[in-house]
Amino acid sequence: SVPAGRIARVTTARRLLASIDSPGGRIGATSGDDIAESVPRLSILGAETIFVSASWHADDITHWLDVARSLAARHRVNLVIANLVSADTPQELWGAVIAKDLGW
């Protein structure tokens, strides 16, 4: 557990991940392409809620929303996802909140 007021950090092969204190608990942030690696690591760093900026497409081989639900449940974190894609595909702009206890 990370003491209140402290920033917890870990450097992965690709980037630095950190969780920080907020009034609603510890938070972290990551990109959508890195959730399989970063959600578990941010959870270890004490993040209770993780913000995800994604560019997921409906025709992706990976069904990212299912992956996100599984990660949230397995690592007991809330995920707040903003899916941002190019302006020529407005039907793919969406957001999601996945509660750690409910998987949705």
Image (cartoon, rainbow, N blue to C red):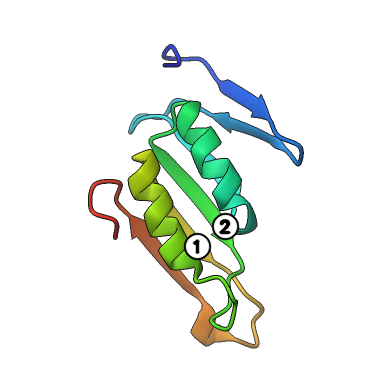
In the rendering, at what x and y percent does residue 39 appear? 51, 43
Residue lying at the far left of the rendered structure:
102
Which image quadrant: the N terminus?
top left
Secondary structure type for disc 1:
strand
Q: Position of residue 12 (x, y in %)?
A: 70, 34
State the mark number for residue 93: none
Q: Is residue 90 above or below residue 99?
A: below
N-term mark: 2 or 1: 2
The three-letter amino acid code for the residue at tag 1 is: Ala
Location of mark 2 (residue): 53
In the depicted view, which residue is nearer to us: 27 or 1?
1
> Which residue is drawn at the image coordinates 62% and 51% (left, top)?
34
Badge 2 element: strand
Q: In the drawing, what numbered circle is on residue 82? A: 1
Up the image or down, 88 lies above or below 8; here it is: below
> How many discs appear?
2
The answer, for residue 15, to whether it is visible in the render is: yes
Estimate the x, y position of residue 21 in percent, counting from the top left.
44, 25
Residue at x-position 65% and y-position 88%: 88
When asked about the image quadrant of residue 27, the answer is top left
Task: Bin the neighbour count of mark 2 within 10 Å (Cα to Cα): few under 14, some 14-19, many 20 and up.
Answer: some
Residue type, mark 2 in image: Ser
How far across and how far down the image is residue 18, in percent? Answer: 59, 30
User: Is there CB contact under 8 Å for labels 2 and 1?
Assistant: yes
